[in-house]
Amino acid sequence: SYDLTQPPSVSVSPGQTAMISCSGDVLPRQYASWYQQRPGQAPVAVIYKDNQRPSGTPERFSASSSGTTVTLTISRVQAEDEADYYCQSVDSSGAWLFGGGTKLTVL
Amino acid sequence: VQLVQSGGGVFQPGGSLTLSCAASGFTFKNAWMVWVRQTAERGLEWIGRIKSESDGGATNYASPVEGRFVISRDDSNSRLFLHMSGLQIEDTAIYYCTTVTFWGQGSPVTVSS
């Protein structure tokens, strides 16, 4: 099991909005980050410190939080967004926690 | 910004190796650096962290690697290291160095007899 809980898969049509949730007890107290990972590649941060976009991340990517759940929202989904997405936070000792990943399929 | 990793390969159980991560494009000495590994079975797994020297330079490790893995840094050459010893089959994974926003390309490590 994983310290952060994500749905295994999300499917969306091109141009629609994808929402990927991540739940965990630490999330109200700690920053969350989101990573995109395409097959055979290293993870790439798309969101850090809850809602900050690294340079190069399209504005279509955003994140929000409510209680113990954070949500990655991808607006106007494109075929290139198809990937695995992982949420990450930290525990009280500073150890990183990861979700199990969500496979985003663009139909 | 780049994190370029080297090292990795096939090693026997009980063996040792060192992974290296060369940083450029940012002020390495101020960065807290992290090692993460990934397998299909366990997903992404935090291995440990080293703080910047200005923040004390302390290291922290995950339980499965505590006492076997050591993280160090060479700020003069902007390099991060992961010294791995007492290798176990379960250490087979792709290893990444990361600062959160930047990730290395990954170093595959296979432990097999």
Image (cartoon, coloured by chain):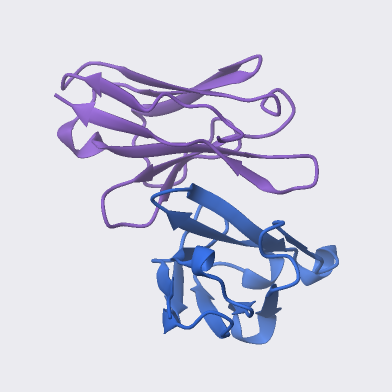
Q: Residue furthest right?
A: B56
- Residue A24 pos. (x, y %): 63, 25
Residue drawn at (67%, 86%) of the image: B76
In this rendering, position of residue B82 left or right of residue A17 = right
Q: Quadrant of residue B72?
A: bottom right
Q: Quadrant of the C terminus of chain B?
A: bottom left
* Relative to A16, residue B67 above or below: below
- Residue B31 pos. (x, y %): 66, 63
Front residue (pair B66, A93): B66
- Residue B26 pos. (x, y %): 55, 67
Chain drawn blue in the picture: B
Q: Residue furthest front?
A: B113
- Residue B104 pos. (x, y %): 44, 65
Residue drawn at (70%, 66%) of the image: B30
Q: Quadrant of residue A15?
A: top left
In this rendering, position of residue A39 left or right of residue A102 = left
Chain drawn purple in the picture: A
